Image (cartoon, rainbow, N blue to C red):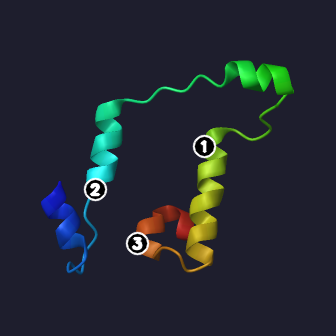
Amino acid sequence: MRLMDALLSIASFRMPSSREGFESLLMDPHVDDSLTIDELGIQRTIPFEETLVGMVRWMYQSGGISAKLAGKLAD
């Protein structure tokens, strides 16, 4: 993973992972925010999938990612 991170600085293509991402995967973090949501009365108004779709479209429209990375959402 360290080698892949080093290659990121010179590679003209995107690597599928990084050391930081791999370490996060190994830690297997779980977060239970249900108590906070209940206490604060937070209501989710948009399904998570729609939130991700909106984020990818915004990233594409603002030039943060290419049409190839955005896929069908770039249309």
Q: Secondary structure at mark 1?
A: helix
Pointer 1 or 2: first along the chain: 2
Which mark, residue 68?
A: 3
Amino acid at pointer 2: Ser
Relative vertical location of residue 71 with respect to residue 38 in this rendering, above or below: below
Amino acid at pointer 3: Lys
Pointer 2 or 3: first along the chain: 2
Give left or right: position of 35 versus 49.
right
Name the spot of residue 47 as percent of width and height, x first: 69, 38
In front here: 36 or 44?
36
Amino acid at pointer 1: Glu
Q: Which residue, given by chain and number where applicable, does mark 1 sit on?
A: 49
Give left or right: position of 18 versus 65.
left
Q: Secondary structure at mark 3?
A: helix
Give the residue drawn at x 24%, y 81%: 12
Give the residue drawn at x 45%, y 65%: 71
Give left or right: position of 52 versus 70.
right
